[in-house]
Image (cartoon, rainbow, N blue to C red):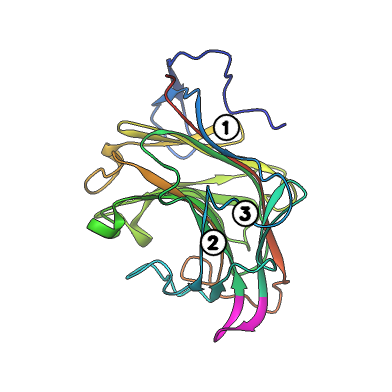
Amino acid sequence: MQKPLFSRTSNLLFLVFISLSFLACEREEVQTVTTFTNLTFEDEFAGTGSIDAASWNVDMGIGNAISGDGWGNNELQYYTDRSENIKVEDGMLHITAMKESFMESNYTSARINSSGKLEQEYGRFEARIQLPWGQGLWPAFWLLGNNIDEVGWPKCGEIDIMEYRGQEPTTLIGSVHGPGYSGGESEGKNYNLANDRFDTGFHVFGIEWGPEYINYYVDDVLYNQITPDDVDGAWVFDHPFYIILNLAVGGNFVGSPNESTVFPQTMLVDYVRVYGLSN
């Protein structure tokens, strides 16, 4: 089993202050690390067949409209619930993008969310994933504020734990979106994988999120912290969020596939785990 981000031998909440000097900045930054030890949600994707309906909803529809006003990003895929696009097999979730004519789209893929099933304020959210590769592929593991229907986006808040351009297999970005810092103006940071690629093996992508901070990790590496002082607007990360996992094709973030893009491509998810404060 993949080593967890932190030791879970204690059920006590503790704070550790770590001084890190990031290559991208000259000043020393103090990072707050909170260990959440109470497992509140997990899916190990055991068995074979469909995903667990008690844990996940499957989105279906045109990628350019699936998320409501302002959320299409000019994506090209049609999200389905077909086994060709989403299934559990060999102990993993398979989300597969295919090039095919389907419902007036030229590509299909899948997207799931935990709305109404797992919605949590604060905690550690992590997933072990092997990413696909290729121009125009856009896999993501992210959180969305559960009040989106009441306040809309970006006031509801969005936490991108991991999003990645398939044409850049050594780089990903972790970011937040909110009022005044959304879309191309989001607050985030790239993480560059040294001497490896995200499409050739599994990596653990995670955040630890507490009052007024969100810490970003790849495997055991803490590479960024975002606080209210970092955003150009209201801090909207103080209410429950739910999980989304998807593999988009095309869109503003990655551009369209080209002749070099090989299909099908699959995003493999070994597990998703969520922790909260100890009881």
Judging by the rendered image, the residue that carries numbered circle 3 is 51
Residue displayed at 69% across by 61% down: 266
Foreground mark, 3 or 1?
Answer: 3
Upstream in sequence: badge 1 or badge 2: 2
Foreground mark, 2 or 3?
Answer: 3
> Between residues 151 and 75, which one lies in front from this camera angle?
151
149, above or below 143, in the image: below
**What type is the residue that disc 3 sits on?**
Ile
Query: Which region is colored magenta?
Result: 99-107
Judging by the rendered image, the residue that carries numbered circle 2 is 111
Judging by the rendered image, the residue that carries numbered circle 1 is 221
Residue displayed at 67% across by 46% down: 45
Viewed as shown, does residue 151 lie left or right of 34?
left
Foreground mark, 1 or 2?
Answer: 2
**Residue 171 horizontal/vertical position (percent):** 59, 51
Upstream in sequence: badge 2 or badge 3: 3
